[in-house]
Image (cartoon, grey):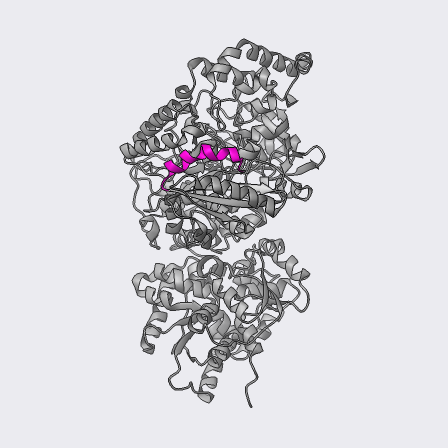
Amino acid sequence: MSRPSAVPGAELARELAAVLRGEVRFGAAERTVYSHDASNYRHLPLGVVKPADLDDVRTALALCRRYGVPVVARGAGTSIGGQAIGPGAVVLDFRRHLGAVLDVDPQARTARVEPGVVLDDLQRAARPHGLRFGPDPSTHSRCTLGGMIGNDSCGSHSLAWGRTADNVEQLELLLADGTELSVGGPLTPDGRAALRALPGRVGELHRRLQEFTDRNLATIRQGLPVLPRRTSGYPLDALLPEHGHHLARALTGTEGTCALLLGATVRLVEEPAARALVIAGYPDEGAAADAVPALLPYRPLTCEGMAADLIAALLAAAPRPRALDRLPGGACWLFLETGGASPREAYQAARRLADAVRRERSATVALVTDPAEQRQLWAVREAGAGIVTRLPGGAEAWPGWEDSAVPPERLGDYLRDLRALLRRHSLHGVPYGHFGDGCVHLRIDFPLDEPQGVLVFREFLEQAADLVVSYGGSLSGEHGDGQARSELLPRMYPPEVIALFGEFKRIWDPDNLLNPGALVDPRPLDADLRFVTAPRRPLPLALPYDQDGGSLAKAVHRCVGVAKCVDPNTGVMCPSYMATGEERHSTRGRARLLAELLRGVQAPPGHQTEAAIADGWRSAEVREALDLCLGCKGCASDCPVHVDMATYRAEFLYQHYRHRPRPAAHYTMGALPRWLRAAAHAPGAANTLARSPAAGLLKRLAGIDPRRVLPVLPPETFTRWYRRHRAAHPAPAGAQPVLLWPDTFSDHLQPNVLRSAVQVLEHLGFDVRLPSGPVCCGLTRYSTGQLDTARRVLRRSLHTLTADGLPPATPVVGLDPSCTATLREDAPRLLGADARPLAERTRTFAEFLDEYAPDAALPQVPLDAVTQTHCHQHAVLGTAADRRVEARIGLRNRVLDSGCCGLAGDFGFRRGHFEVSEAIAERVLLPELRAAGPDTVVLADGFSCRTQIAQLAQGRPALHLAELIARALPAEPS
């Protein structure tokens, strides 16, 4: 049980901590992290509770009611309207501990779930039965069923399987006054009468709801538009007799304003055994939208629209996915998926649909049946929410009008008018979305960090609301209203309907305790914005942030809360979150903390700011959150908006410890190259000391965890071996020179890696050279925030290379991915243009073989292998060349989806990190190695990865690719 500190709401926090089994967090870090969702808004809560069970939920609500503190329910915090945050509220994080699938009934095709269950976890539980939950928003890897029920989420397959409201059977509810009840539907007249007859508060509630409905039948029937997508306002039409007085549907989409969800029974649908994808190309999005009504009778599972400017935004931020080659000609595409009981059936349905597309002369069409290609194409669409936060020209784009919906038959004209409205305001955006349902997602480059930008924001939203209403549409098609759109509801609904919304809310929550300010009595749409519009003091920074105009504030505001970093199941990002499950240890949480820090630091003198992080660069809260950042750079590649937390961490550590004592590990492992060069003069003595009784004291002084084994120093460094080798084996005349970078780890700790590279490269006829003097990439200094020293180290290395006089185009081959990535990416950040030539000619070992020896005969290695990919190689360097080289040598390789190994340079060695380091390795890597056969080769190019495997996998050896190939070379004649 956690103990809160003396903070706002301390009395409530103490009472909560005394009785709850889950975590109670009222400190500055947690309040900051939970002050944002995926919207434009920022609301500092009073505190955060992570209930361990439903009794915790009941108790927390009762105490908040006693103190008069509002309560906001939260799942993954991906709400785009601002409905998962609340000022001065206690936020209940249901995702942390209440995420179980309680039961799957394949006969009834239902599942019972806790409110915090992640959608993908439900899909995994249903898949063995050939079933799935129909709605599938693009955040499916982290969004929760509770959040989906709160927003009435939809996703791309709502054409086939409906919205969340269409798939709820029963909801278990907790009201603000402590009443518990179950609601479902549809109800017969006898069923309604039985509910009216129930005793107590439950019976009273049902009587009031039925009287409310009967009294307002005409208003409800006439005042709510009938649309495939309408999630603005309360869905009161679900209470109508013709809809069975369906209370579960009436509560779906109420954004946590009426009741807390304790559990749900949801409907499952049959998963198609096979799928095919028809991609229809059109000259523009208007033409694509106009074509939709003629295609819907063919009953596609999806009808998604995606225009060329979304592709342009993708290409501006990341390498071109090969799957884009399958797009037919055009400037806007419809993704039309078909399903069937067999591949042939799915293909035949796709052929019929493709024939229908071709009837429109301007259309082009492609048919994709390969499942892997389909997944790649859908991945582009799913990344849309993140991709379009930066427009192709680099401008930032924000939500606010990202979810409007109209009748599908009117979508083309609406899109044309919407584009015209953008032009009138000199605004830009990238429309895409669920064209088959008439729903458009659109982020817009509102100038929200400027004072006049707020006026532009309001004026556009008001005019856009009037536009969508003129088309018979809805302000929101699946994201809900929150603070972003609730104020606009009177533009969509007549006053009498707005009054009914208020009355409906008061029936359930008369004291307005649950998520106040959303839907009813809303906060202004232009208040509480997370952007600082006041003048900001420029900061002296150590790194350039070229992609963000030199602004760290803009860099951290790249994070828009789509929360791919809290997907705990796949990818590299974010290893510390995968281990701890704590939001503040995610990329998103750390970005929020840095943004809050900068809110205070950049305030001009005398300007008051309501910043939870009050001590700026000295913040202990930010330091703690960043302490468990492994610097893996996974976020820089895997985050849809390329938040680069490893870089931001280096900046923070530089500022935090500037002119202050540092942790011991910064002096020892940060200066590791220096210590290893010294120890290389007497490796035997160093090894004896490291394994003597004094080793414990040595580790303690160095800030190293006592459970870690210090690496053994070899009797000879690689550079000494190379001098002997070159004296005995001169390079052949006329051979192409290649410069081998003798990184510290390989040179002083595992020289066989570099020796193997020399052996392979010389076998292929290259003249392998070394720098004439010591070189270092500066990574150990960079990662600990010693940026001035890292700069000096790199500059000395550049001077050494320049003095060697090699031709400027001589390729540089790095063996360790972390050092190679530093040369390629971080060196230009530190030294600017001076380091770019080195960065441009730096290659990994596999890249060099692939590029400079593409036709060379490599030895065959017909073995089974598993590969642990180094994080920096994944994020910065890429692995395509490795896969091609492995194919050339006949290696049967499987790349593990294990993410970071958990060692990450000095991270896993530092005192206080061992448990997290081990937990990261145990997530996938270590179980996979235990399951691998004894003859399976383990490939790991990273020194850190090989060390972690050796220390935590019972000494199992792991090889660098160079070692594997060198072993297969023919023996040299004596």
Asked whether residue 198 appears in the rendered view, the answer is no
Whether residue 518 is situated above or below residue 941 in the rendered picture? above
Residue 282 horizontal/vertical position (percent): 39, 42
Residue 965: say if magenta: no
Q: Nearer the viewer, residue 933 or 3?
A: 933
Residue drawn 46% across the image and 44% down it: 279
Q: Position of residue 432 (x, y in %)?
A: 42, 39
Please tell me whether residue 973 is drawn above or below residue 683 in the rendered image: below
Residue 498 in the image: above or below residue 935:
above
> The N terminus appears in which quarter of the rendering?
top right
Q: Tell me, yes or no, if residue 386 can be seen here.
A: yes
Furthest-bottom residue in this view: 974
Q: Main secondary structure of the magenta part?
A: helix
> In which quadrant is the C terminus drawn?
bottom right
- Residue 294 inside the magenta-drawn segment: yes
In this rendering, position of residue 334 left or right of residue 198: left
Q: Which residues are magenta?
A: 283-300
Residue 726 in the image: x percent, y percent?
A: 45, 85
Q: How many marks?
A: 0
Residue lying at 63% horizontally and 43% vertically, measured from the top left: 341
Quarter location, residue 614: top left
